[in-house]
Image (cartoon, rainbow, N blue to C red):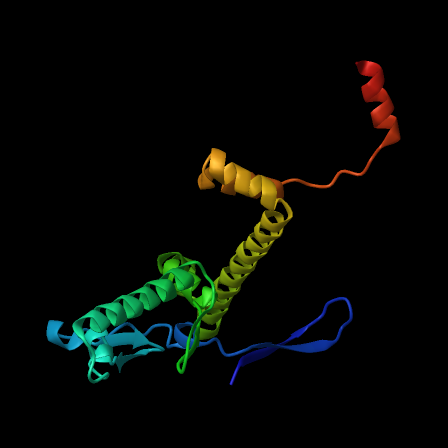
Amino acid sequence: MGLSFNFKDKHKSKEYKREWRRLPNKAMSKIDTEKPKLDASQYENKIWYDGKYWDVNVLEERDIINQINDITEEERKKLTSIVFNAELFCKETLLNECVAHLPYVGTFKINAGKRYLEKHAEEIKQHYTPEMNNRDRLKVRIDFYKQGWREFSARQNEKSKEDHFRKMFKKEYDECCKVMGKSYAEHFIHSMTLLEFIPFDQDFEDAFQNAK
């Protein structure tokens, strides 16, 4: 269930109901609950998720390849390279805040809100006061959670603009890559996203021409 309370609108003198929907994963775990300490040997193949430890089944390259029978050493090397590159691609895709897909497994993406909560855990604690109850603390976490998604959306919009200008100025982008390097070309595309449209002003144009 979500958290809800009633409040009155001072201007309309009506009572409204506002709800906080259940936040996924760590955001809705018990706020005051800390990770229980385990022995060093117990941490192996375990992950802290949603307020408790979960067992993790680790599948390595050799475990995947050993499922295939009657392959030569050369084929084994090729399969190892394929598995390694698939893992590397998935990692880079997630770090770039994009969606990764593995056949027969599903799609994966980083939860921007949860990631923001984990990154600003100490800052969140500084917003807590002794007078706060669990509901007030949850409101603080909700604000940070939403802020994480707002910043994620802003970054995605910026990437979309860059992709748009990269297609629009493909010739100039390719030329910059050849002559100046890809880093310069990427800065060129990013600078295009910072430009703003200015409508034509005849009075300003006349004043500019007369000032020459």
Residue 134 in the figure: left or right of residue 190: left
Residue in the image at 37% along x and 77% along y: 30
Q: Quadrant of the C terminus?
A: top right
Above or below: residue 14 compared with residue 173:
below
Q: Which residue is at 84% across, 21% downward?
A: 207
91 sits to left or right of 168: left
- Between 41 and 161, the residue placed more toward the observer is 161
Q: Quadrant of residue 102?
A: bottom left
Residue 41 in picture, x, y percent from top left: 11, 75
41 lies left or right of 1: left
Which residue is pictured at 45% across the width and 37% down the height? 181
Q: Position of residue 7 (x, y in %)?
A: 65, 74
Residue 129: in sight, yes or no? Answer: no
Q: Nearer the viewer, residue 86 or 10?
A: 86
Image location (x, y in percent) of residue 167 = 61, 50
The one nearer the camera, 45 or 72, is: 72
Residue 39 falls in image quadrant: bottom left
Q: Position of residue 21 (x, y in %)?
A: 54, 78
In this rendering, the count of numbered labels is 0
The residue at the point 47 percent across, 34 percent down is: 180
| Residue 123 shows up from this direction | yes
**Residue furthest top in the image:** 212
